[in-house]
Image: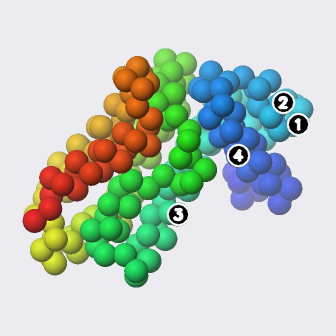
Amino acid sequence: MSGFLSGRDEMNRERILEGTIKVFRDKGSTFTMNDLSKELGMSKKTIYVAFRDKESLLYNLVDYFFDSVKKCEREIVCDDSLSIKEKFTNMLGVLPVKYKDVDLTGVAFLKDKYPRVAEHIAERLESGWESTFTVLDEGIKEGIFRDVNHTVFKLTFESAIERFISTDELYRAHIKYSDALEELVNTMIGGILA
């Protein structure tokens, strides 16, 4: 669909998605379209031209977020100044700068109110592991990491992330998502070091 949008429409969509990130950071997952309209200084009608409803907006935001993560991963892979261990650690813990202070634990409400969006988050979490496994395999070959089953590693990591964002446990424990992610990555890396 985005292939048929004019440059201006595409810029509006990106501006709306960026504004949604800000409103989500400030108000949490229960932000309203009025909140977004106010943040952007844009009419709700203009927002609804770009996204038919809040569910559509959130669905597209999931792709916008994960596309940013994948872009950062590609940059990490191409960074020859990093060791294999640093690349793998950074890839697992990648969180684009604009999301560092966004509490992703706030997406827990999606399961009930927007199940399609919640399913899409799970789909995106479960896909795109190829470059991560390539770096892992390099580390295994070089003796940095012990031989580890890809499926078990992936399922363990995905399950933890899904738990982080689908419950309010981190929030209740006063743990920021970014801190929990860093702890998870350190635990996972420590568990596979040769």
- Residue labelled with disc 4: 18
Q: Mark yes or no: residue 115 visible.
A: no
- Give x and y (percent) for residue 94: 44, 56
Question: What amino acid type should be assigned to the residue bearing mark 1?
Answer: Gly
Q: In this view, does 48 lie to the left or right of 149?
A: right
Residue 20, relative to residue 130: is it above or below?
above
**Contact between labelled residues 1 and 2, with CB atoms less than 8 Å apart:** yes
- Name the residue furthest bottom: 80
Tell me the residue at 77%/26% (across/down).
35
Assign the C terminus to one quadrant of the image: bottom left
Q: Mark 3 points at which residue?
A: 71
Q: Kindly identify the amino acid type of the residue bearing the numbered disc 3.
A: Lys
User: CA separation, marks 3 and 1?
Assistant: 29 Å
User: In the rendered image, which residue does mark 1 sit on?
Assistant: 41
Q: How crowded is mark 1: few (under 14 residues within 10 Å), some or many (20 or more)?
A: few
Residue closest to the far front? 174
| 65 relative to 150 in the view: left or right | right
User: Type of residue at label 4?
Assistant: Glu
